[in-house]
Amino acid sequence: MIKKLIKRVFGKSAKVKSVGAAQVIPFEAHAVDRDGISFGARRVTDGLQAAGFQAYVVGGAVRDLLLNKHPKDFDVATNATPEEVRRVFRRARIIGRRFRLVHVIFGEETVEVSTFRRAIDAEDAQTDEHGRILRDNEFGDQEQDAARRDFTANALFYDPSTQEIFDYHNGYGDIRANTLRMIGDPEVRYREDPVRMLRAVRLSAKLGMKLDPATAAPIAKLKELLSNVPEARLFDEMLKLLLSGHAMECIKKLHEMELHHGMLPMLDVILEQPMGEKFVMSALQNTDQRIADEKPTSPAFLFAALLWHEVLATWKLKQDAGEKAVAVLHFAMDEVLERQRAQLAIPRRYDTVMKELWVLQPRFEQRSGQRPLRLLALPRFRAAFDFMLLRCQSGEADVELGEWWEEFQHANDDRRAAMLMPDTGAPKKRRRRSKKSTSSAVQSELPID
Ligand code: ATP
Ligand code: MG
């Protein structure tokens, strides 16, 4: 079918050959130029081919080039073993214990090289009781390597030297039809690796591809299987999703497919409260925008934002119980982080930054004496200020507070002196633009420093 289509569109010059089970799509048909391949990936495929091996650019990069998107990175697949790959390149090291991959380094660029692998037959695969594959690192050939990949669009091999694409599962046709389709029986493939359900959501949102109905159908029934996935893997996938540049769309889709349950408790709870939802959505939109602008993003900032309303609620409960505000903020933070860890393991290395961002929030309320200057001088001021602006945008903090700090940080000394509020020593009432939109927890004046 693809042959006919290509002949019709491109005439006789664009011949689709079959090599074994693969359709070979010529450059004239797909128009992916080798100049679109990164320097490092090109060096790797050239080097391996010169040494007598097969080597192709594979996976997400080929898919993205066909979709006219900028690939995030370039992976190479080869029939050379990791040791053979390492011998060809000067700066190469073998990584990973389960899947042994080779990283070949060219200055800033690292190219990941994997040896063709095969999926292990159901009989000899090690699986858990739900069918999840625990071991699948047997080497194989190109055709087998295509079959063990997830979606047809992710199973294309591009040879930069001939500019041909090898396609075993009609991935080329599916990309042209904007369809994300699971290779093989979707239910079996989700059981083998439930993370594929999240990948289906993330890739379809990120690439604007529709999920093939048969690929989408089993998700509703199998979503519970995500609870068997090791926490660190789930966290990695969640991070990819949140930092995909299309987090808003991804979260919406997760919600629609009810895949968010049990992963981020705040998504269950918060998306149901209007203020929380607004805040989370502003944070995600802000992250998406930063990625579109090629600005750096910080996972700690994002997770701090996602958990903020949990912290607020817990903090408020403790204050209502009559405890002192500053001290209980720390307890509230620890409690929320522990609760979260039971669901989705946010690594502890993010804790310090997250806590700092939270703890600095009440300090924006303090606008007299030396306090604003001290806050301004902190290395984390900029991030904390951005965080506070999100709170203003969502209506949880006063818009006027954000405006005051925006002006104060850029003002000269005279203007700053004029802007400072009188220091009466006692907690004072501030002018509020909208009573409804302020949270009593954050509005309280806290002698934090
Ligand atoms: P991205 O653009 O987000 O990097 P990607 O498709 O390249 O998307 P990677 O995680 O980099 O995603 O994976 C590289 C390739 O490995 C995929 O294109 C796919 O062929 C294969 N792959 C990744 N994860 C799985 C999985 N869970 N099951 C089967 N194949 C997978
Ligand atoms: Mg990739």
Image: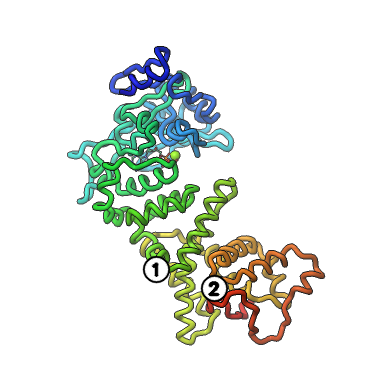
Relative to 407, 211 lies left or right: left
Q: Position of residue 141 (x, y in %)?
A: 31, 27
Residue toward you, 9 or 42? 9
Element on which disc 2 rests: loop
Which badge, 2 or 1, is on the more N-terminal residue?
Answer: 1
Residue type, numbered disc 1: Arg
Task: Kindly indicate the quadrant of the structure image that contains residue 317.
Answer: bottom left
Which residue corresponds to the image point at 37% horizontal and 18% vertical from the top-left? Answer: 8
Q: Is residue 248 above or below residue 444?
A: above
Mark pair 2, 1: CA separation: 27 Å
Element on which disc 1 rests: helix
Q: Residues within 10 Å of mark 2 (few under 14, many from 20)?
A: some
Q: Position of residue 332 (x, y in %)?
A: 47, 74
Q: Position of residue 389 (x, y in %)?
A: 60, 64
**Does any atom of ligand 1 lie closer than 8 Å to the CB of label 1?**
no
Q: Residues within 10 Å of mark 1 (few under 14, many from 20)?
A: few
Q: Position of residue 404 (x, y in %)?
A: 68, 69
Residue type, numbered disc 2: Ser
Task: Name the quadrant of the C terminus.
Answer: bottom right
Q: Is residue 48 visible?
A: no
Residue toward you, 152 or 91? 152
Task: Kindly indicate the quadrant of the structure image that contains residue 270.
Answer: bottom left
Q: Is residue 247 above or below residue 308?
A: above
- The residue labelled by disc 2 is 437
Which residue corresponds to the image point at 50% horizontal and 39% vertical from the top-left? Answer: 72
Relative to 239, 372 lies left or right: right
Q: Which mark is residue 339?
A: 1
